[in-house]
Image (cartoon, rainbow, N blue to C red):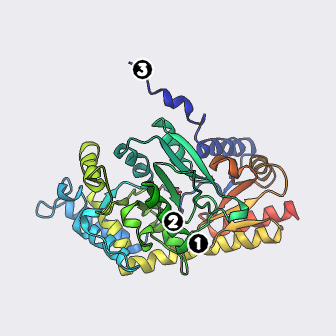
Amino acid sequence: MQINEHFANLHESYLFARVAERVREYEQEHNARAIRLSIGDVTRPLAPCVIRAMHGAVDDLSRAETFRGYGPDATSYAYDFLLSAIQNHYKKRGVALSFGEIFVSDGAKSDLGNLLDLFSVEKVLLPDPVYPAYADANLLAGHKIIYAEGREENGFLPMPEEGKGADLIYLCSPNNPTGAVYSHAQLKRWVEFAGRHGAILLFDAAYEAYVTGNFPRSVYEVEGARECAIEVSSFSKAAGFTGVRCGYTVIPNELVRGGVRLSSLWKRRQACKFNGVSYVTQRGAAAAYSEEGERECGEILAYYRENARILKEGMNGCRLFSTGGVHSPYLWVKCPYGTGEQFFELLLSRCGVAVTPGGGFGAGGERYFRLTAFSSREDTAEAVKRITELLT
Ligand code: PLP
């Protein structure tokens, strides 16, 4: 027996773990707390109606009459009340989904990797820069990876190029780390490209809640996407569920390959390797998508948006080029000199502020660093003040 030799292809340590380690070292050396504008984790508490729903669900579990065990297997362990809330969420943007097309999960990251079980893939196309978990999952599976370059010149929104196709194409909009968001017309070009080449789009909508104005929040807002796209979404950044864990994947009925509905395959796959998301979590997630939840979560998103605005204004004040921070909790900042790693070290050692070096998101990120709006207002303002003092 041999171990999976592809582990050797993974980067030595996952970027965020490496950054966290350096920050811990800094804190020990200086006996001080660093301001973390690095890791993409939320900090605000859950919305009150979510908390109430979860408390209520725990009470349900305490009584024999309302107790729940495994979720219903007809719907891959998702309860109708959550499927209905997700269905309604999509309906608001004119997208009709049936229950059988929605699969509730413990978060987007698991599904983005696990979906590879459905395919025998030779080549995948990933944006560069992008969320590193896509590359890691595909490296582990031994897939050949090619990249579509997101650069300043194309607004960090890579577009399809004839002759550069793949079996699977990952798209992330709004993008982590650049905050760039595709327009309907741009997404349509990807949908048409995938349709022409028989490719499947894996559309990561983890940040859709941050979109403002007339930009697509779901790939299914684009005609033709139901035949070629799987959408993966999450309550993590929309409702503060990074610790609670809940997400979902949408696989439309029209998505058929080799004469087989991919939703049927995924259902079978989930029955083999997954046993559902807890009842308490599903109640909380449904509450987050209720009218009250949308309003309360909207207030939390507004808090992060204001942090992003403060960061953006601060970077402008330092005359640093940045993108993102509008449809996204991330600001993607260009180093005035040197690399993102050097800036990470500079800002940590001189300001006690941790940022994420852009190179960890792909070759296109070498000369950038990422700031997140997920800190407290006080930390965000203090970090901007310190960076401004250093750079101006
Ligand atoms: N997709 C993107 C683009 C992300 O940035 C993240 C988390 O940072 C995830 C997916 C993972 O989300 P989840 O917490 O639902 O696993």
User: What residue do we see at 77% from left, 67% from top?
Assistant: 315
Per the model, the C-alpha gap separating discs 2 and 3 is 39 Å
Q: Position of residue 232 (x, y in %)?
A: 42, 59
Q: How far apart are the alpha carbons under marks 3 and 1?
A: 45 Å
Q: Residue at x 55, y 29 (%)?
A: 8
**Residue 155 percent coordinates (x, y):** 68, 66
- Tell me the tag on residue 2: 3
Tag 3: amino acid: Gln
Residue 236 lies, with reference to residue 361, above or below; the image says below
Residue 327: image tag? 1
Task: Specify whether tag 1 is near ligand 1 (CB below 8 Å).
Answer: no
**Residue ID at (32%, 63%):** 252
Q: Earlier in the sequence, mark 2 or mark 3?
A: 3
SS for tag 3?
Answer: loop
- Looking at the image, is mark 2 or mark 3 nearer the viewer? 3
Crowding at dot 3, Cα within 10 Å, few <14 / some 14-19 / many 20+, comes out as few
Amino acid type shown at disc 2: Tyr
- Closest to the observer: 206 or 59? 206
Farthest right residue? 392
Residue type at mark 1? His
Can you say which quadrant of the picture contains the N terminus? top left
Q: Which residue is mark 2?
A: 207
Q: Distance from label 1 to label 2 (Cα)?
A: 8 Å
Labels 1 and 2 touching (C-beta < 8 A):
yes
Q: Is 95 left or right of 343, judged from the image as shown? A: left
Q: Is residue 19 visible?
A: yes
Q: Quadrant of residue 95?
A: bottom left
- Up the image or down, 86 lies above or below 130; here it is below
Q: Residues within 10 Å of mark 2 (few under 14, many from 20)?
A: many
